[in-house]
Image (tube, rainbow, N blue to C red):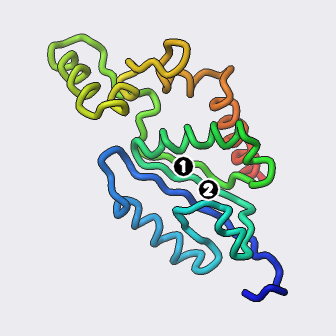
Amino acid sequence: MTANSEEEDISLAVLSHGLWGVKSHMDYIENQLKKKYKDKLEIIESMIVRLGKNGKKVKKISFVGYSLGGLIMRYAIGILGERGFFDTIQPQSFVTFATPHMGVRLPSSSLLSLMFNLISGRLVSRSGEQLQLVDNYKQHKPLLEIMSDPSKIMFVVENDILLLLLFLLLL
């Protein structure tokens, strides 16, 4: 790209794997996106600022999260929305699969479920506590509860994006 050329508008796809995942878990999705969109879609791991330095302007963004990666995407969308990120970049899609949006805590109805709750909450440290809903993220509430609270910015931003995406699909 030369100094005289126009900015290239691109769509950005952010992929996030699960708790014990590795980059290769998202390879199929990445390969399918590249196959369909070829050079029209870039999948990157670095900052949007770097793209701007190369004469590319991100106009649309999609988020795809697998397992814990879906929760990470939800959290990121909330933070980005709070910072006004979506004022200039249009959300294109938000997809999660096999994501424990309600946590993984089992009802304490048996010895097995009690043991699962105890072990899984400690086995994976902070993430385990958050998935078990026993962390104290803010105001003595678990992070997943705050992310699901309709009065909190994370929920409002996610709903705005979902409503926008639903509207765009209906057009």
Residue 56 placed where, x, y %?
72, 72
Q: Which mark is residue 166?
A: none
Report whether 60 appears left or right of 87. Answer: left
Report whether 56 appears left or right of 133. Answer: right
Residue at numbered disc 1: 95
> Residue 164 or 62: which is nearer the viewer?
62
Amino acid type of the residue tagged 1 in the rendering:
Val
> Residue 93 or 5: which is nearer the viewer?
5
Residue at numbered disc 2: 62
Residue 101 placed where, x, y %?
46, 32
Separation (CA) of disc 1 from disc 2 = 8 Å
Choose the circle earlier in sequence order: 1 or 2: 2
- Asked whether disc 1 touches disc 2, contact meaning CB atoms under 8 Å apart, the reply is yes
When asked about the image quadrant of residue 78, the answer is top right
Residue 118 placed where, x, y %?
23, 20
Residue 34 placed where, x, y %?
52, 75
Among all residues in the image, which is located at the extreme left? 111
Query: Residue sitting at 15 percent across and 14 percent down?
Result: 111
The crowd level at tag 1 (other Cα within 10 Å; few <14, some 14-19, many 20+) is some
Report helix, strand or loop for mark 2: strand
